[in-house]
Amino acid sequence: MLRTLGSDLDDTVPAVRPITAEDLLTLRMGFGIDMAPPGTYPIQDAETAAQLRSFGPPWPPTPHGPDEWMRQLGALPLMVQPGTTWL
């Protein structure tokens, strides 16, 4: 998990607990859309470079199939502690 939202991708701290099904269903899983302008935070740049297209409109679609998309997403750190913030 990122130390702060503006931290570099390698400036991380451990998550205090695992992500739960409730976190996923309530969009509090620790990763999601930040309404800051593109390029404000390093995590936005990494998401763009991975071509996940999870921060904006779903068009054009990502070039990844489901397994590769999940692999790319799993390579990014969480933005906030699981269960703490709706994103």
Image (spheres, rainbow, N blue to C red):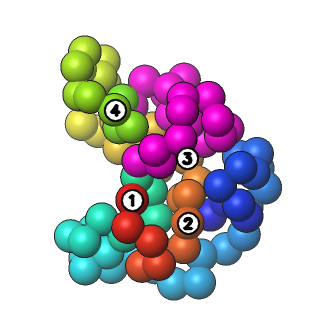
Task: Give coordinates of residue 77: x percent, y percent.
Answer: 58, 54
Residue contact between numbered discs 2 and 1, judged by CB atoms under 8 Å: yes
Instruction: State the residue position of label 1.
Output: 87
Label located before the other in sequence (1 or 3)? 3
In this view of the protein, which residue sits in the foreground, 75 or 12?
12
- Given this view, does label 2 or label 1 mark the residue nearer the observer? 1
Could you tell me how far apart the alpha carbons at marks 3 and 2 are, in whole angstroms? 12 Å
Instruction: State the residue position of label 2.
Output: 80
The residue lying at 67 percent from left, 74 percent from top is 14
Magenta span contains residue 48: yes
Residue contact between numbered discs 1 and 3, judged by CB atoms under 8 Å: no
Instruction: State the residue position of label 3.
Output: 76
Task: Give coordinates of residue 15: x percent, y percent.
Answer: 59, 75
Q: Is residue 34 visible to the viewer in this orientation of the structure?
A: yes
Q: Report helix, strand or loop for mark 2.
A: loop
Label located before the other in sequence (2 or 1)? 2
In this view of the protein, which residue sits in the foreground, 83 or 39?
39
Instruction: State the residue position of label 4.
Output: 56
Q: Quadrant of the N terminus?
A: bottom right
Task: Give coordinates of residue 49: x percent, y percent.
Answer: 54, 23
Could you tell me how far apart the alpha carbons at marks 1 and 3 are, in whole angstroms? 16 Å
